[in-house]
Image (cartoon, helix red, strand yellow):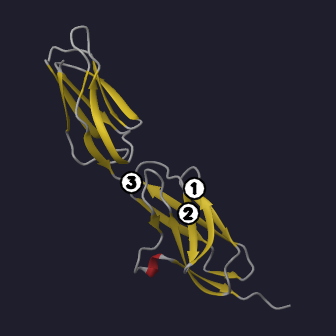
Amino acid sequence: MPRIRFWILNKTFRFSRKNNLTATVAPSVASGTVTFSGGAWSTTCLLVAGTCSVTTTSLPSGNVEVVATYGGDTNYAASTSAATAVTVPRVTSSLSLSGGGSTSTYGDTVTFTVTVSTGDGTATGTVSLSDGSATVGTCSLTTGGACVVISAALTAGDHLLVARYAGDANRAPSASAAPGKPSARMKMWLKRSAST
């Protein structure tokens, strides 16, 4: 049975970024393909002089046990490498909150737009809008990583609003205001409605 050796060319993995994987099969005259796999993910490359390398951007985030499997050929049987533990961290995200206006009137329906930005494409999942400890609205992200929160739950007075993205399988949570930085929050004043 041929021996297969698998190693990671770069130790720092990133979701949706280029990650390099290499395997060698001995003897080097063995032909055929090697499949790298981990969980539901897999990719295949062709052996050249006993070596097979692949650059992939499709590794899932999380903890993955990756193995390299040589498929065999006419003269050499299939074989599988030992598993290598790989951790692919979620992509960081940033969040912006806009709309509402600096001043609205109690009883008005107030509309806010939340946009989640990542370096790998469109974020999915949900966003909540809070006023202190109270949640005043939620929305689900759509194409472009944005959604609209409509809230009629605000009382008259001063408000510091924070939007929070819950994250998804491949993207980390984020908020429109970092802890200890209230200036990053949205400040607005809700006037009392006129009496009749």
Residue under the image location 19 percent in, 15 percent down: 30
Amino acid type, mark 1: Leu
Q: Is residue 54 above or below residue 166?
A: above
Between discs 2 and 3, the one toward the N terminus: 3
Q: Furthest-right residue in view?
A: 196
Marks 2,1: beta carbons within 8 A: yes
Give SS at disc 1. Answer: loop
Nearest to the observer: residue 195 or residue 59: 59
Residue visible at 25% across and 8% down in the picture = 74
Placement of the N terminus among the 4 image quadrants? top left
Callout 2, which amino acid? Val
Which picture quadrant has residue 46?
top left
Q: Please tell me whether mark 3 sits on a helix, a strand or a loop.
A: loop
Foreground: 108 or 52? 52
User: 154 or 74, which lies in front?
Assistant: 74
- Label 2: few (<14), some (14–19) or many (≥20) C-alpha neighbours in 10 Å: many
Provide the residue designation for mark 2.
Answer: 127
* First in sequence: mark 3 vs mark 1: 3
C-alpha distance separating marks 3 and 1: 17 Å
Q: Quadrant of residue 37?
A: top left
In the rendered structure, which disc, 2 or 1, sits on the residue that comes first in sequence? 2
Q: Is residue 82 left or right of residue 177?
A: left
Residue, disc 3: 91
Label 1 sits on residue: 141
User: Are dots 2 and 3 in contact, CB under 8 Å?
Assistant: no
Q: CA distance from mark 2 to mark 1?
A: 7 Å
Q: CA distance from mark 2 to mark 3?
A: 17 Å
* Residue 105 drawn above or below residue 77: below
> In the picture, which quadrant includes the C terminus?
bottom right
Q: Position of residue 175 (x, y in %)?
A: 47, 68
